[in-house]
Image (tube, rainbow, N blue to C red):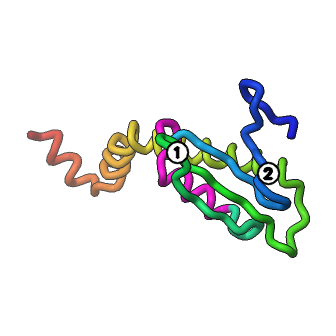
Amino acid sequence: MDDTQNGQSFIIETEPGVFFVKLKKAVYEQEAVMQASYKFTNACFIKIDAVEEGYVGIWFKAKPQVNIDPNLLLCEYCNEVLDQQVRLDLEKRYGKLRDTIYQFAFVPIKDRMDDLDE
């Protein structure tokens, strides 16, 4: 495989037709990994398990009826995990602010006017 980082492939074929990606738990939360993995269950059988301290391993085996390049599929998976993690990070950072704005926007005008009088 030609996708390398520090001279090592981040996608490894562990046996014919079975591919493996290892992700750092310090970078990717379990929820991001699970959400991304779920999006790929239509194309692959997926197994997720701890592999070594601080890492999670994800194994992929294409379903028989799916004809797709495994490199492309797993690169897309890695992008999806990143996307899910960014969503989680943004929710933690700005979720309360979003909820406050949303709540204020949908409070009846009378209640807002009462708050201004106080």
Q: Position of residue 114 (x, y in %)?
A: 15, 48
Question: Total number of numbered labels?
Answer: 2
Find numbered disc 1 in the image and state the secondary structure of the residue it sits on: strand
Residue placed furthest toward the bottom: 65
Taking the magenta stretch, the answer to whether it contains residue 38 is: yes
Q: How far apart are marks 1 and 2 (CA)?
A: 18 Å
Label 2 belongs to which residue?
13
Q: Is residue 44 magenta?
A: no
Name which of mark 1 and mark 2 comes first in the sequence: 2
Q: Which mark is residue 84?
A: none
> In the rendered image of this protein, does residue 40 appear above or below residue 83?
below
Q: Is residue 37 left or right of residue 69?
A: left
Crowd tier of the residue under label 1, counting other residues whose Cα lies within 10 Å: few below 14, some 14–19, many 20 or above: few
Bounds of the magenta span? 25-39
Q: Nearer the viewer, residue 41 or 62?
A: 62
Give the percent coordinates (x, y) of residue 118: 9, 40
Q: Which residue lies furthest to the left in this view?
A: 118
Q: Looking at the image, which residue is at 68% across and 58% down?
A: 59
The overriding secondary structure of the stretch rendered in magenta is: helix
Question: What is the quadrant of residue 15 in the picture?
Answer: bottom right
On the image, which quarter does residue 44 sit in?
bottom right
Look at mark 1 in the image and give the residue it sits on. 52
Asked if residue 103 lies left or right of residue 87, the reply is: left
Residue pictured at 77% horizontal, 67% vertical: 43
Residue sitting nearer the eye, 109 or 22: 22
Residue under the image location 39 percent in, 37 percent down: 93
Amino acid under label 1? Glu
Expressed as whole percent of the image width and height from the top left, the position of residue 117 reads: 12, 40
Viewed as shown, does residue 92 lie left or right of 60? left
Residue at disc 2, secondary structure: strand
Relative placement, left or right, of 77 versus 70 is left
